[in-house]
Amino acid sequence: MGNLFLREKEKWLTWSLWGFVGAAITLYTAFSTQTPHLIAISSTASVVILAWWMQRTRRFDFGRAFKVCSYVLFVSILPTFILVLVPSDELNRFDLIFQSLSFITFSLLVCLVCSWLAKRPKQYY
């Protein structure tokens, strides 16, 4: 029956390590190229790989998977946003706000899809 009534504690160190790996990949992509589309793709790649891993372990419900995916994506993109995108002089304030809002919308959609894919199937007893 598994852990029917037992709530698992989150392993925030593990999720932080996933976020730091995603941040390293995203920072490398951001420093090598200034294209915002590649930065967004590299930051969401770690979340997609994480969702695949969570689906393989089959022990995550939708809410827990969404919380973990959102945290990993936030940790992955925050250093790049602070170090590369904000200090960039070639973007005016409107472009920065538009890119930030479009990335937030895109990342929310990716987190929803990845959480839906990572959830465990219903168990019939």
Image (cartoon, rainbow, N blue to C red):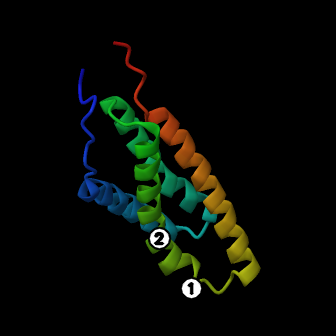
- Locate residue 72, reporting x and y percent: 41, 57
- Locate residue 12, reporting x and y percent: 28, 57
What whole-number distance in Å separates the C-alpha atoms at marks 1 and 2? 13 Å
Which quarter of the figure is the N terminus placed in?
Answer: top left
Which quarter of the figure is the C terminus placed in?
Answer: top left
56 to 31, vertically: above or below: above
- Report which quarter residue 53 is drawn in: top left
Q: Give the residue at x 50% y 52%.
A: 44
Contact check, label 1 and label 2, Cβ < 8 Å: no
Please give the count of numbered marks on the rendered protein.
2
Q: Is residue 31 visible?
A: no
Amino acid of disc 2: Leu
Amino acid of disc 1: Pro
Q: Secondary structure at mark 1?
A: loop
Numbered label attached to residue 78: 2
Q: Give the residue at x 52% y 73%.
A: 81
- Locate residue 16, reporting x and y percent: 31, 60
- Left or right relative to 87: residue 90: right
Task: Return the residue at label 1.
Answer: 87
Numbered label attached to residue 121: none
